Image (cartoon, rainbow, N blue to C red):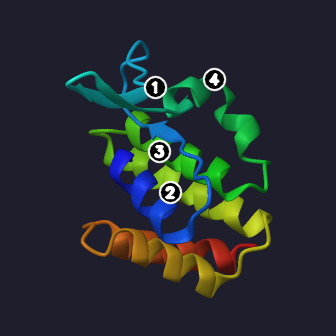
Amino acid sequence: MFSYNYLLFDRYARPIANLAVLADEDAGWRPDHYGFEVLGCRHTLKFPVVKLIGYADRAESLGANPNPFALITIAHLRTRQTKGDPQARYQAKLNLVRALYRQGWDRQRILVSVCRYRLDDASAECTRATAMASYRNR
């Protein structure tokens, strides 16, 4: 983040805002700066931090939020919750696809988004089938 901040500032000659989105499970780990000091010269970047785990108790309300980051957060939280449980993971994906339809996404946009995200995922076929079944059942 430190390097990108400088490179963007150098290229566009405009102030750059940073935000750290942390997807780990350690609620206490919240790095909010990076920097170094050499021979009395200090260079530091401070930035706000968002922990996705902090939204675990609000996952249901996020489903109604039209912000795409809300859906990404739900997907992340459900991935954590369903680790090691293929049936629960399938149901979580089905629920996510249904939420996308409720927000006005069409079948093609969902399929392209899902496949672009994880082409190497063994469950991509399952997800495609889920999307198509949900579309038919709307």
Residue under label 2, please give it. Answer: 93
Report x, y in % for residue 82: 39, 39
Is 23 on the left or on the right of 96, as rendered? left
Report x, y in % for residue 12: 55, 69
Check the picture and name the quadrant holding the C terminus: bottom right
Secondary structure under badge 1? loop
- Circle 1 packing at 10 Å, graded few (<14), some (14-19), many (20+), is few
- Circle 3 packing at 10 Å, graded few (<14), some (14-19), many (20+), is some
Residue under label 3, please give it. Answer: 76
The alpha-carbon separation of the residues under discs 3 and 2 comes to 11 Å
The alpha-carbon separation of the residues under discs 2 and 4 comes to 19 Å
* Visible residue check, residue 137: yes
Residue under label 4, please give it. Answer: 57
Q: Nearer the viewer, mark 4 or mark 1?
A: 1
Q: Residue at x 34, y 27 (%)?
A: 42
Chain-order first, disc 2 or disc 4: 4
Kindly indicate whether the residue at mark 2 contacts the one at mark 3 (C-beta within 8 angstroms).
no
Residue under label 1, please give it. Answer: 32
Chain-order first, disc 1 or disc 2: 1
Q: Is residue 36 above or below residue 66?
A: above
